[in-house]
Every structure is written in structure tokens, then in C-alpha cells.
Image: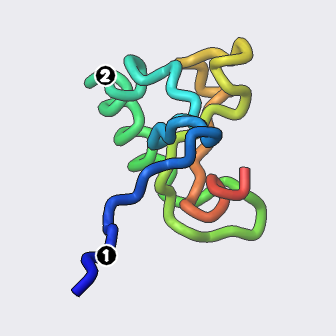
Amino acid sequence: MAKLNTTRERPAWLPDSKPFGRMYRGNNALYNSARWRRFSEAYKRNNPLCSVEGCNNPTAYTDHIQPISVGGAVWDMDNIQPLCISCNASK
């Protein structure tokens, strides 16, 4: 009986796959810091609902309005908004 080849080799012309390679992760140190986690949890406790007009879902994310990668202030309360899962995904 012939044995099936179950190994999947990528064609030579196809670049190597890197899981999550397309995602920009330049701010990992900030978002993984204890200071940010404390700040984010406190902010979500004080802002329990999504800030998008007409959305009343619970807050899941502490979002920077202007991304810090383009010059947004990290700790400025005017640059922070609470977002639910679906509103954050659509942003």
C-alpha cells in the first residue's frame, strides 16, 4: 500500500510564513508594562461603556485616539477613549 505524503513543504517561490508578521508591535514594552495595565484597568472601571455614539457595549479596550506611533501622547487623558470589542475591530 502506498504511503501518503503528509508533510507540507512550501513552494520555493513562496516566502517563509511568519505568524503575526503583518502586525505592527512596536509598543509592546509599553502595553506589557505593569504601569499601563494598572492605568488601563482603572480607566475601564471609570468608563464602563464604549465611547462610540449609539454603542452601549461594555468597554474592552483603552484606545489611543491618535496612535502613539504617529505622535499621540501616551498618558494624556484627551488622547484616550474606551472602546468595545466590535468598535475597536472596526477602527
Which of labels 1 and 2 is toward the front?
1
Badge 1 is on which residue?
4
Q: Amino acid at mark 1?
A: Leu
Q: Which residue, as the protein is rendered here, is positioned at the far front?
A: 1
Colour treatment of the image: rainbow
Give the label on residue 67, or none. none
Tell me how many marks there are. 2
Q: Residue pushed farthest bottom? A: 1
- Residue visible at 49% across and 21% down in the picture: 27
Compare residues 23 and 35 and report the one nearer the observer: 23
Q: Depth check: 57 or 3 in front?
A: 3
Q: Residue at x 51, y 27 (%)?
A: 25
The answer to which of marks 1 and 2 sits earlier in the sequence is: 1
Q: Nearer the viewer, residue 84 or 44?
A: 84
Residue at image mark 2? 33
Label 1 secondary element = loop
Question: Is 72 above or below relative to 81?
Answer: above
Q: Residue 75, how many percent across, how many down?
A: 53, 18
Question: Where does residue 1 sit, x and y in percent of width and height?
Answer: 22, 87
User: Which of the 4 quarters of the picture holds residue 39?
Assistant: top left
Near-viewer residue (30 or 81): 30
| Up/down of 42 relative to 75, above or below | below
- Dot 2, crowdedness within 10 Å: few (<14), some or many (≥20)? few
Amino acid type assigned to the residue bearing label 2 in the image: Ser
The location of residue 48, given as percent across then percent down, is 48, 57
Residue at 62 percent across and 70 percent down: it is 56
Residue 53 appears in which quarter of the rendering?
bottom right
Q: Residue at x 41, y 36 (%)?
A: 40
Q: Secondary structure at mark 2?
A: loop
Left or right of residue 36, residue 63 in this image: right
List x then y, in percent, for residue 22. 60, 37
